[in-house]
Amino acid sequence: MVVRVAALVALLSACSSANSTGIAPVSCPPAGTTLTYANFGEELIANHCIDCHDRESPVLTTQAAIRQHASQILDEAVYTDAMPEDRGMPLMERERLGEWLACGAP
């Protein structure tokens, strides 16, 4: 029980230290997006997410899993800098991630 409480406190502390990125809620551009899993998403996830999310929930090893968790990814990696934990993702990549996810992560 003590271990679970400690883990919960650590998780909440990490979440509470997230900062807004200033990116407003994203919608898919009227003309769609040129970003695809093949030319954008796969590499971005590999560079910024997969070190942890190949085994930790949510597991983001497939395009389908990324789509399933799109709203969570938007909240934690686009609208805030909660993820990645090292906060090493540049703002421009966060904006592009938001666009790609808003368009359905094609």
Image (cartoon, rainbow, N blue to C red):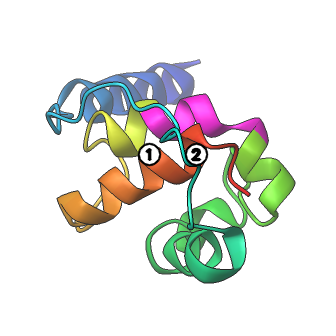
Q: Amino acid at mark 2?
A: Leu
Q: Position of residue 58 (x, y in %)?
A: 69, 45
Spatial CA span between label 2 and label 1: 5 Å
Q: Position of residue 36 (x, y in %)?
A: 66, 68
Image disc number at residue 98:
1
- Badge 2 marks a residue whose secondary structure is helix
Residue 87 visible in the snapshot: no
Q: Position of residue 26 (x, y in %)?
A: 40, 32
Q: Is residue 73 magenta?
A: yes
Residue drawn at the location 38% of the way across and 45% of the way down: 77
Q: Label 1 crowding class (10 Å Cα cut-off): few <14, some 14-19, many 20+?
A: many
Residue drawn at the location 40% of the way across and 37% of the way down: 76
Horizontally, residue 47 falls left or right of residue 59, namely: left
**Which residues are the magenta region?**
68-74
Q: Label 2 crowding class (10 Å Cα cut-off): few <14, some 14-19, many 20+?
A: many
Q: Nearer the viewer, residue 6 or 53?
A: 53
Mark 2 touches mark 1? (CB < 8 Å): yes
Horizontally, residue 64 falls left or right of residue 10, namely: right
Vertical side of 46 occupied by 29: above or below: above
Vertical side of 52 occupied by 74: above or below: above
Q: Quadrant of residue 75?
A: top left
Report the predominant secondary structure element of the magenta stretch: helix
Residue 90 visible in the snapshot: yes
Q: Position of residue 18 (x, y in %)?
A: 21, 34
Vertical side of 65 occupied by 93: above or below: below
Q: Amino acid at mark 1?
A: Gly
On-image quarter of the N terminus? top right
Residue at image mark 2: 101
Residue drawn at the location 21% of the way across and 66% of the way down: 90
Residue drawn at the location 50% of the way across and 21% of the way down: 2
Vertical side of 23 occupied by 55: above or below: below
Q: Residue furthest front?
A: 31
